[in-house]
Image (spheres, helix red, strand yellow):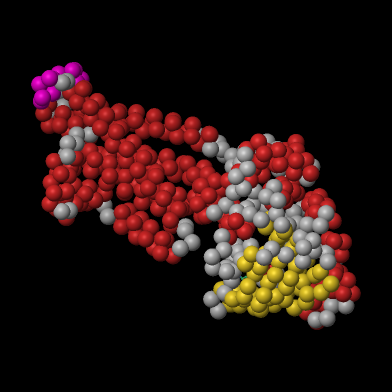
Amino acid sequence: MITLRDVCKAYGQFQVLSHCSTHVAKGEVVVVCGPSGSGKSTLIKTVNGLEPVNAGEIIIDGVSVTARGTNLSTLRARVGMVFQHFELFPHLSIIQNLMLAQVKVLKRTRPQAHKKGMALLDRVGLVAQAHKFPGQLSGGQQQRVAIARALAMDPVALLFDEPTSALDPEMINEVLDVMIELAREGMTMMVVTHEMGFARKVANRVIFMDRGEIVEDAEKNAFFDQPRSERAQQFLSKILVH
Amino acid sequence: MSYNWNWSIFFEPSLDGTHTYLTTLLWGAGWTLATAFAAFAIALSLGSVVGVARTAPQAWVRALSTCFVEVLRNVPLLVQMFLWYFVLPELLPDELGTWLKQLPDAQFYTAVVCLGCYHAARMAEVVRAGLQSLPGGQRMAGQALGLNLAQTYRYVLLPMAYRIVVPAITSEFLSCTKNTSVALAIGLMELTGSARAMQENSFQIFEAFSAATTLYLALNLIIIFAMRRVERLAVVPGYGTPQKAA
Ligand SMILES: Nc1ncnc2c1ncn2[C@@H]1O[C@H](COP(=O)(O)OP(=O)(O)OP(=O)(O)O)[C@@H](O)[C@H]1O
Ligand SMILES: [Mg+2]
């Protein structure tokens, strides 16, 4: 579903990603972790072309993200993305947030988009909030809306960049529960997160990054039980102790 | 100070012999109003385009719009007025230049274009400030949903940016209205111009400029009240910390 081949990216002299390659199969859940500044956010943003790359190739569902002629907007409409800081549109009500791209990009009629939006709000337990504005919701609720907004586009895959790290602890689970349900339903997901509980529960594979490189790309149990690289061992011992 | 107050001067006929001074002042206020609104319409639309261009991903678009802004906001308005009115027709091909000079109400059109461009440069900075005050993730979120760049600006970035800068837009509108008085220099008989004509012909300087002051004040107060309404409409529930303005 998602293939990265030798992806490289630099900001001037600074190499953010060097020769990153991986593959996420349909229905697979891959967790990306690693120390701060290792390039996780950059990697996940290159996947739908939000960050251009200097070299390498990215293919989503048979369409090349990196080829010149690709219509990135069309492609992005098929890949959902959820951000650390939710990024709901503050001037639109919750239901309007869910309808905007359905109407403007997928050209659904407003009643169609509304119906779909309400069904998804029901699914994340927020129908009652449909006519509120993002600023009137808690962080956990906003992130659930953001997931629903991504789902409204009927995406072939979902990308998450630290979806719970801006949340108060008591709200983390309500978001993780939605994600776990999605994973169980077979959604293809690439998730940057430090929630190792989530990784253990639903991930198929774990990618460990450090200094712009994919240091480990292993099956979940192999990664947690016997990480090969020293850097991954250190990282795990740090975040699992707490 | 010995000064002959004469408030009834307003009802005396002006130099043209038919209209009273009051009528000429109101005509002046009318020109001021027309110039201000037309110029501000240009400022708002052109300024938005240039402001967006200032934040565009393409370097050459940004460079071009920066040039526009820096030239137009750094040359004194009075000089610009002279350039548009006296110099531009000479630079154009003969026919076009003559047509411009003979245009009825040429002063009005020149003032509108000149003020419009000048305030567009300033408005561009206001719009840019609004756009840049938004978190960078907003643009990404729009594009991640498949909106193209134009749609992202239209539906995601600009609606918020405008809301944030409404108070600054109000200020621009007010200075645009006041700056119409510069058009006096190219002979537009706007409010200041007609007040001056009245003073020169009747020697009632205080009456003339009291009237002008009152009319300017009234005009701007109307704008302020209208913009307050806009400000209230622009409030986004739950966004930022609402603060009461006096
Ligand atoms: N626009 C930019 N210009 C220059 N350097 C950048 C830019 N964006 C990111 N970087 C650098 O690239 C590196 C990788 O950033 P990235 O945000 O991908 O890391 P991350 O793994 O997501 O970190 P975190 O866990 O803190 O989110 C960092 O060292 C960062 O300083
Ligand atoms: Mg990050």
- Give the main secondary structure, helix, strand or loop, of the magenta stretch: loop
Please give the name of the residue rendered at 62% of the width and 67% of the height, measured from the top-left corner: A64
The quarter of the picture where residue B32 lies is: top left
Q: Position of residue B198 (x, y in %)?
A: 16, 28
* Residue B6 appears left or right of B243: left
Report the magenta residues as a range: B5-18
Tell which residue pokes out farthest to the front in this image. Answer: A62
The quarter of the picture where residue B68 lies is: bottom left
* Residue B14 appears left or right of B231: left
Asked if the magenta segment contains residue B136, the reply would be no
Please give the name of the residue rendered at 67% of the width and 65% of the height, measured from the top-left corner: A62
Q: Position of residue B36 (x, y in %)?
A: 31, 37
Q: Nearer the viewer, residue A205 or B168?
A: A205
* Residue B103 appears left or right of B77: left
The quarter of the picture where residue B146 lies is: bottom right
Please give the name of the residue rendered at 19% of the width and 40% of the height, measured from the top-left corner: B107
Quadrant in which the N terminus of chain A is drawn: bottom right
Q: How many marks?
A: 0
Q: Would you place residue A47 above or below residue B2 in this image?
A: below
Q: Nearer the viewer, residue A74 or A89?
A: A74
Asked if the magenta segment contains residue B9, the reply would be yes
Can residue B2 be seen here?
no
Please give the name of the residue rendered at 23% of the width and 30% of the height, measured from the top-left corner: B28
Q: Position of residue B115 (x, y in %)?
A: 29, 44
Can residue B130 be seen here?
yes
Q: Nearer the viewer, residue B214 or A242?
A: A242
Q: Would you place residue B209 above or below residue A143 in this image?
A: above
Quadrant in which the C terminus of chain A is drawn: bottom right
